[in-house]
Image (cartoon, rainbow, N blue to C red):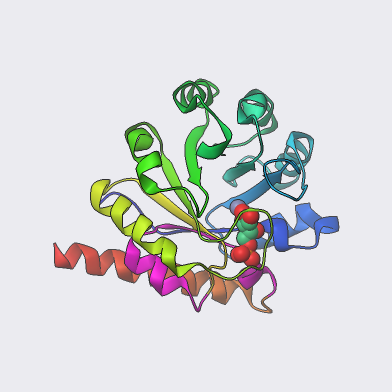
């Protein structure tokens, strides 16, 4: 097993007027990476920010924090180069938004970023599977993309379990409604990259929440390796 537990706060749930400071605060609280939600008002019914903001955040936080760009946009091809130039580390696009995933994967790699591939709740895991050998991370959405603070969809867990059984080394991320009350389901299913927005950002003690989420994933990884 070559994957590890990583916790990535979704800063969508933070005070957006203080985004740079919020990113720094999350890293100081023990975040392994930052999950940045890009929405275009077309692929999802909400708008957030684009690559100019990412460039400012990169200048603010310095070179080290890992930026996982969750691209909830139509025509994700359009933003690969600008995001790479702005300082993104991973480009996670939705399979529903493109007709040429193979070409996009290649372009992302050539731009020097890691490749993430996301599926919405209504998309089957079989649609992602043909690409799993070419990507660095699969994102199984556990809410309809568009907004923070929604309820976790437990019925997405079979997708995670199936991916983990087929691709033992793949990074598998869950996003939406994940927090202390739902992390065990995700960890048991085999997710190892955990996005958490409101549960971390609205907590008075984000450090403890991040630590708790990581412990749950580490325990599940340990149990899995003992069971083998
Ligand atoms: C939803 C976004 C999520 C969201 C998660 O479309 O992709 O990253 O911010 O927030 P919570 O954890 O509050 O559901
Ligand atoms: Zn997200």
Image coords of residue 30 (percent x, y): 56, 63
Image vertical order of residue 70 relative to residue 100, above or below: below
> Range of the magenta residues?
180-202
Residue 147 as seen in the image, left or right of residue 160:
right
Image coords of residue 187 (percent x, y): 37, 66
Give the residue displayed 28% in from the left and 49% down from the top: 2
Give the residue displayed 74% in from the left and 50% down from the top: 45
Image coords of residue 35 (percent x, y): 60, 51
Tell whether position 73 is magenta.
Answer: no
Give the residue displayed 64% in from the left and 78% down from the top: 205
Residue 19 as seen in the image, left or right of residue 10:
right
Please tell me in which quadrant of the rendered image residue 147 appears. Answer: bottom right
Please tell me in which quadrant of the rendered image residue 60 appears. Answer: top right
Give the residue displayed 64% in from the left and 43% down from the top: 72
Any part of residue 220 in sight: yes
In the picture, which quadrant includes the C terminus? bottom left
Any part of residue 197 in sight: no
Q: Residue furthest right?
A: 17
Residue 11 as seen in the image, left or right of residue 174:
right
Image vertical order of residue 146 relative to residue 219, above or below: above
Residue 79 as seen in the image, left or right of residue 213:
right
Numbered disc total: 0
Tell whether position 201 is magenta.
Answer: yes
Q: Residue furthest front?
A: 122
| Of the pair 57 and 61, the residue shown nearer to us | 57
């Amino acid at each position: 097993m070559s994957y590890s537990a990583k916790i990535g706060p979704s800063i969508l749930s933070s005070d957006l007027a203080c985004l740079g400071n919020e990113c720094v605060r999350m890293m100081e609280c023990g975040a392994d990476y930052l999950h940045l939600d890009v929405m275009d008002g077309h692929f999802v019914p909400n708008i957030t920010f684009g690559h100019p903001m990412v460039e400012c955040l990169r200048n603010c936080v310095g070179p080290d924090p890992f930026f996982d760009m969750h691209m909830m946009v139509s025509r994700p091809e359009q933003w690969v180069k600008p995001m790479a130039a702005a300082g993104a580390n991973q480009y996670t696009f939705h399979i529903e938004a493109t007709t040429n995933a193979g070409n996009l994967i290649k372009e992302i790699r050539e731009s020097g970023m890691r490749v993430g591939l996301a599926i919405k709740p209504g998309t089957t895991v079989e649609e992602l599977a043909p690409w799993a050998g070419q990507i660095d991370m699969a994102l199984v959405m556990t809410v309809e993309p568009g907004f923070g603070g929604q309820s976790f969809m437990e019925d997405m867990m079979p997708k995670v379990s199936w991916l983990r059984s087929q691709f033992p080394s793949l990074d598998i991320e869950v996003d939406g409604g994940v927090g202390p009350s739902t992390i065990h389901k995700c960890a048991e299913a085999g997710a190892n990259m955990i996005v958490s927005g409101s549960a971390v950002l609205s907590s008075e003690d984000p450090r403890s929440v991040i630590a708790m989420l990581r412990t749950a994933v580490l325990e599940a990884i340990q149990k899995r390796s003992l069971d083998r």
